[in-house]
Image (cartoon, helix red, strand yellow):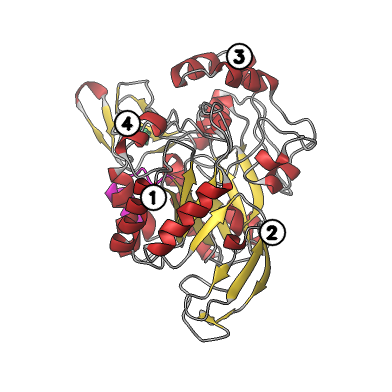
């Protein structure tokens, strides 16, 4: 949900590239890859239901296109037939059958109860005759080779490329979403291509990516594909990293943790009010997910998008830092990321730099050892500092790693262990 695929408002000649959280992703897009009909809709700020209703129109479907820019061997299918769609359909792994052919999804805390021939909130899971299905297995609508720093994961194979993919769908609806054209779409409304797990692993391997990243939309909703792809990747020596909002139930999360190598969680705020009003989700299950990920020993980093007036008070930032230290420890990297006006939050300004510096100062003072600032290329807080000798052990500018001084997991200068997964 972070690590956004910036394509809606920008062409390669956009006059405002600084608005893009991931400028390199824009560079991979073909010139003119703006979607006029979607942009018009964004201007009128449709609600989610309006959006989905409009999206059912054939002309709308024809307009929506996702991007495989920069990845050899990829092309997107045009609108697919019902027969084609059958390739993408597998039975869901977490649900229960109810009376009258209803099903209850047990994948995320929303627990949708779904009538026959209906779909859950995320739009990518469907009840067919009392059996529940995922409609997005192997249904890739976006693929890029990104620096792992763009996810962002700063303590996981720094400087390596990640083979990054998404399907349509999301289980929340963040008002600041930068990829809403895929996250808030149904699978039929975006162009996609069939990439079964083994093929995805081969593509990552052939493109010399040590990891596959499940990102851009919300990988929880393509859970079955993600797990199968992670297994296929591991069989070829390719790791898997999950870029998620962490809105998932405990049982599927635990199974996922046994099959992937890192999980980055977008912790969007430290208040239930924000989650209710801005995310259409809940904070508590996300905090529970973070604790489980930590307990199961999966490498974890946290991103917090700081939005002016909504989640940037001293009290909230301090509570956040205190909770992380008490529940996850001081070594979990925390990335404060700069907000730019997007989607349904265009009325707010970009986060002032002073606010981000203040957030970092608060988290530092609470004792967190690895606090970063993101979306501010060139800021000193992009680099990793040894907590003991204070020297730079990973120097970054934007998404580029300039120098690394970590050897066998330790600071090269003073031998202090630096937590993470290193080359
Ligand atoms: S994963 Fe989708 S269908 Fe399942 S509970 Fe969450 S939103 Fe509903």
Q: Residue furthest bottom?
A: 414
Task: Give the CA separation, mark 3 to mark 2.
Answer: 36 Å
The disc label shown at residue 317, or none: 1
Asked if marks 4 and 3 touch (Cβ < 8 Å), the reply is: no
Write down the region rendered in magenta. Answer: 245-255
Task: Give the CA separation, mark 1 to mark 4.
Answer: 44 Å
Indicate whether residue 251 is drawn in magenta: yes
Q: Residue furthest left?
A: 99
Relative to 127, is 304 on the left or the right?
right
User: Residue 266: where, in percent of width, then height?
Assistant: 44, 47
Sequence-first tag of 2 and 1: 2
Give the image quarter of residue 141: top right
Q: Depth-wise, is mark 2 or mark 1 nearer the camera?
A: 1
Q: Depth-wise, is mark 3 or mark 1 nearer the camera?
A: 1
The disc label shown at residue 4, or none: none
Sequence-first tag of 4 and 3: 3
Task: Give the CA separation, mark 2 to mark 1.
Answer: 40 Å
Task: Give the CA separation, mark 4 to mark 3.
Answer: 28 Å
Sequence-first tag of 3 and 2: 3
For the residue pair 213 and 83, the one nearer the viewer reads as 213
Element marked by disc 3: helix
User: Residue 18: where, in percent of width, then height?
Assistant: 69, 42
Mark 3 — residue?
58
Task: Give the CA separation, mark 4 to mark 2.
Answer: 38 Å
Task: Give the CA separation, mark 3 to mark 1.
Answer: 45 Å
Sequence-first tag of 4 and 2: 4
For the residue pair 359 and 422, the one nearer the viewer reads as 359
Mark 4 — residue?
131
Sequence-first tag of 3 and 1: 3
Mark 2 — residue?
207
User: Residue 87: where, in percent of width, then height?
Assistant: 53, 36
Q: Depth-wise, is mark 4 or mark 3 nearer the camera?
A: 3
């Amino acid at each position: 949900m972070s690590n956004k695929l910036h394509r809606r408002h920008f062409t390669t000649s956009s006059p405002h590239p600084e608005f893009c959280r991931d400028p390199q992703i824009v560079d991979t897009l073909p010139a003119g890859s703006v979607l006029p009909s979607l942009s018009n809709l964004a201007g009128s700020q449709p609600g989610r239901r309006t959006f989905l209703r409009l999206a059912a129109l054939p002309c709308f479907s024809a307009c929506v296109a996702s991007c495989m820019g920069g990845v050899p061997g990829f092309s997107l299918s045009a609108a697919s037939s019902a027969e084609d769609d059958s390739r993408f359909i597998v039975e869901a792994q977490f649900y229960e059958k109810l009376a009258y052919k209803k099903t209850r999804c047990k994948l995320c805390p929303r627990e949708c109860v779904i009538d026959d021939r209906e779909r859950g909130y995320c739009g990518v899971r469907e009840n067919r005759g009392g059996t529940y299905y995922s409609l997005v297995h192997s249904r890739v609508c976006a693929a890029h080779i990104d620096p792992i720093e763009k996810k962002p994961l700063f303590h996981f194979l720094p400087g390596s490329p990640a083979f990054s993919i998404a399907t349509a769908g999301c289980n929340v609806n963040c008002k600041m979403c930068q990829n809403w054209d895929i996250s808030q779409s149904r699978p039929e409304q975006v162009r996609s291509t069939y990439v079964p797990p083994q093929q995805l692993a081969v593509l990552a391997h052939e493109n010399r990516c040590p990891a596959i990243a499940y990102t851009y939309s919300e990988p929880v909703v393509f859970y079955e594909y993600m797990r199968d792809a992670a297994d296929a990747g591991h069989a070829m020596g390719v790791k898997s990293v999950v870029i998620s909002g962490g809105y998932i139930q405990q049982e599927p999360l635990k199974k996922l943790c046994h099959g992937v190598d890192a999980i980055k969680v977008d912790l969007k705020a430290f208040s239930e009010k924000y989650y209710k009003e801005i995310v259409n989700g809940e904070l508590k299950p996300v905090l529970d997910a973070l604790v489980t990920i930590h307990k199961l020993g999966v490498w974890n980093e946290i991103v917090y998008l700081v939005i002016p007036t909504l989640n940037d008070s001293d009290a909230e930032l301090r509570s956040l830092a205190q909770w992380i230290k008490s529940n996850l420890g001081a070594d979990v990297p925390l990335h404060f990321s700069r907000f730019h006006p997007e989607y349904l939050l265009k009325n707010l300004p970009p986060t002032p730099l002073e606010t981000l510096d203040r957030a970092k100062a608060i988290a530092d003072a609470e004792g967190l050892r690895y606090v970063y600032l993101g979306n501010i290329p060139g800021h000193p807080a992009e680099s990793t500092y040894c907590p003991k000798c204070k020297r730079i052990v990973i120097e970054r500018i934007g998404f580029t790693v300039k120098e690394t001084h970590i050897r066998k997991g330790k600071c090269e200068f003073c031998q202090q262990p630096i937590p993470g997964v290193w080359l």
